[in-house]
Image: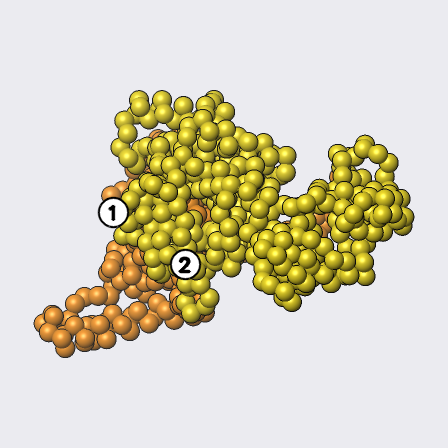
Amino acid sequence: MRRPFGAAVLTAPLLLFLLVTFVAPIGAFLWRGVTDDEVRPVLPRTVVALASWNGTGTPGEEAFAALVEDLRAARSGDRGAIPRAAARLNADRPGFRGLLPMTARRVEAPFEGSARAAVLAISEEWAAPETWGAIARAGGPMSSFHVLAALDLRQDATGAIGQAPEDTRIFRAVLLRSLWISLLVTAVCLALGWPLAWLIATARGLPATLLLAAVMLPFWISLVVRTAAWMVLLQREGIVNAALQASGIVDAPLPLLMNRFAVVLGMVHILLPFMVLPLVAAFRGLDPRLPRAAASLGAAPWRVFLRVTLPLSLPGVGAGCILVFIQALGFYVTPALLGGPNDQMLAWFVGFYATRSVNWGLAAALSIMLLVAVGLCVALYGRLAGFRRPGAA
Amino acid sequence: MADPLVRFERVRKTYGTGAAAVQSLDLDIARGELMTLLGPSGSGKTTTLMMLAGFELPSEGRILLEGRDIAQTAPHRRGIGVVFQSYALFPHMTVAENVAFPLSVRGVGRSERDSRVAKALDMVRLGGFGDRRPAQLSGGQQQRVALARAMVFEPPIVLLDEPLGALDKALREEMQLEIRHIHQRLGVTMMYVTHDQAEALTLSDRIAVFEGGRIRQCADPKALYDRPADAFVAGFVGENNLLPGTIEARDGEECSIRLRCGPLVQASAVDCGGRGEACVVAIRPERIAVAGVTASDLGEGALPATVLEAIFLGDHVRLRLGVGDGGEILAKRPAGVGSLPEPGGPAAIAWPEGAAFAFRDTTPRV
């Protein structure tokens, strides 16, 4: 019992560090994808009043009265609260960004008669069930709104889940695109990295060192710099186009930048070492007597490769592929700089919603989707190949 | 030899500009023979095996297999079975798949393949282990799988490169007998490489003793032990007392040698010069008779000695004896025969005629 305890004490600082700098912030961020806490503080009574509403038709007088009361209270409180709630509601139903502050301003003055008539007089929008549905959905504290939105789904006022409107359906396509680009990059890395790794693993002395250094060299240069270098190379008046035109291969400059080709090229360049290094380790761990034994037993070189060398390098192939694929899935800078609008991957949208449209909930939900996709890939790999050490098959 | 299965003709192998790993090798291996290449590490025996297997190319000379020069034949076309030092079993295949490998690459049909694999596994007493992975087997079992795999396609010759090196002593001795029995039962030709002289004596029909890239002697185990051709073989195969001295007189085979430590002894000249030349006298420890008496009591030719140490080893006793001026002789005698001489006490030693051999002094003394 002493040893595990001692080990736990020794690793405690690291665990604490990870908890504080990694698990906690990421957890807090992802938490925002499944919670909703911007509308409830502003419209507490309205949310309660809507709890018994069935989602069809306009809600009753008590909901309107609660809305008026909430908005009056909010106007006298924190000045940023109403715009924040309006922004959140606007993400669900466009138009709310203006509607809520305007309604709040107009109901401040006392009025005669029913709250329902007064509010409907401000805007006909308040007659639509979906307007109230948006408030009900944003009532929190937990919410499936962002996660559903990340899957191009939405809930209507009655709680039924359906497809998002055609023109806002993008995330499933983005996820498929991200998976496809990652797969493509992994395949290209494998095709290029396998022979290179074989060469490095079988070379001896100085050539092996130089080859390995050449593979490792890109690690010493910032990812942004390497990506920017590709922009210089591939642009319309760039080196590649100039060379192609000068040699007469093409008449007009080729569109090499802002497309899928540039994205895959840049990503392969950055991720290749992650494929080569596990493969080199796998090849180096391979007993050199095994191919010899196979040859002595009558196997021609191609058969030695297919039946001995290739199967024994598979754990390395698996490790390399999973490393490259997972990293590719989360790529952000390279597609953003080298790709066109149709080459952006999931991480770009996370960045977009987190920083530009300030929709933290959706950004978090997209991150959850990315995390789940990666988790599924790792689980699939574990199921197919097992989590063994490379070379210890 | 009329029709050798394998013939090495003036084979030489050099690496780069260094000394030759194998210098002008001539060796015939007969059909059905178990030939052992015995020698210390770096003596060229493994290089010789690898040249026959096709993983090394001779720099000069020819290697004939069944009368054909195989210099241009790729390893996988030679059809020679090889058992490697570390077994080299394929870790990703089961035992049965390992043994079936040489058959499947030869396009042998499934049903025949299965029956031959089963037969081969039975031969090495591993029937029923076919579904295991090599990693689940003990070292001795892995070795047997490697043997079955190298023999299942019925090659004309099986090469074994220090196959028992990784096993402990008891298992090694058991496997030696097993290999010998398989060889006797199937009559397959085998070339066996080892640095363990006891193993070579146990297994072999003939032994080629390698040293410095040359064959020092090639003979059957008894001849090798009883009539070593030079001082190296005398010292390497079995235990021997090697006593330096100078030839005082020579009469044909018989010579008188003045040992460096003093006494004058008689020995049969095997490979030595004439009067005045340096030589070593080799006497097997078990041929030396020791008595706890003075030399004159043992008869003519006996040497006076002092018992330095007596080591009891169960079945026999090893005696370290001081002879003359600083000379030391090792003697063995069966335990339980007579009483042990007391250390420090006087003794007399003698050996029968023909038990001592004189060789040219070539071994560098350490």
Circle 1 marks a residue in which chain?
Answer: A
Asked whether residue B14 appears in the rendered view, the answer is: yes
Circle 2 marks a residue in which chain?
Answer: B
Residue closer to the observer: A3 or A97: A3
The colour one sees for chain A in the rendered image is orange
Asked whether residue A279 appears in the rendered view, the answer is: no
Marks 2/1 in contact by CB < 8 Å: the verdict is: no
> In the rendered image, which residue does mark 1 sit on?
A167
> In the rendered image, which residue does mark 2 sit on?
B24
| Percent position of residue B108, x then y | 28, 29
Q: Amino acid at mark 2?
A: Ser
Q: Quadrant of residue B342?
A: top right
User: What residue sits 76% from the left and 35% below the top?
Assistant: B334
**Letter of the yellow chain:** B
Q: Is residue A139 above or below residue B247?
A: above
How many residues crowd mark 1 within 10 Å: few (<14), some (14–19), many (20+)?
few
